[in-house]
Image: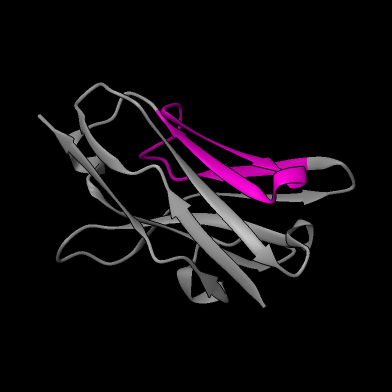
Amino acid sequence: QVQLVESGGGLVQAGGSLELSCAASGRSSSNYATGWFRQAPGKEREFVASISWAAGTFYAYYADSVKGRFTIARDNAKNTVYLQMNSLKPEDTAVYYCAARTYTTSRSPEDYNYWGQGTQVTVSS
């Protein structure tokens, strides 16, 4: 069992930055891939970024809408995954969730077994 807790959301002006954190506890999180998803009101939950770790190498993936603006990173020693969000746009406004699944990443939320409670990100124009 893995427990996930997100933090770092808030209100920011367009063009600003925020860093989200996802702290994991429970079983060793190094065997888990972590994804960030977001859900805006009236919309489906969508993939933002994901990261996995294997044989000393991190593998990161991004949605096209955030590529070049967001960076996902992982600190195995702290069991924490970060999402650095730069050049934020009003369309980035959503509740952001981190999720975990065994070993490999996926862009589909249905593939993830564990979810955090979410953190609100609001970008004003």
Helix, strand or loop for the magenta stretch, by majority: strand
Q: Position of residue 36 (x, y in %)?
A: 47, 53
In the displayed orientation, state which residue is furthest to the right: 55
Residue 7, image x, y percentages: 42, 48
* 104 drawn magenta: no
Residue at the image point whose x is 32% and y is 23% from the top: 87
Q: Is residue 37 left or right of residue 13?
A: right
Instruction: Give me the residue at 60% from left, 65% from top.
Output: 100
Q: Against 28, is 22 above or below?
A: above
Residue 61 among those drawn in magenta: yes
- Residue range in magenta is 58-85
- The residue under the point 58% across, 53% down is 23
Q: Quadrant of the C terminus?
A: top left
Q: How many marks?
A: 0
- Please tell me which residue is depicted at 46% across the width and 54% down the height of the picture: 6
**Split into 4 quadrants, where in the image is the N terminus?**
bottom right
In the current view of this chain or complex, which residue is farthest to the left?
125
Quick one: 98 or 62, which is closer to the camera?
Answer: 98
Asked which quadrant contains residue 121, the reply is top left
The quadrant holding residue 63 is: top left
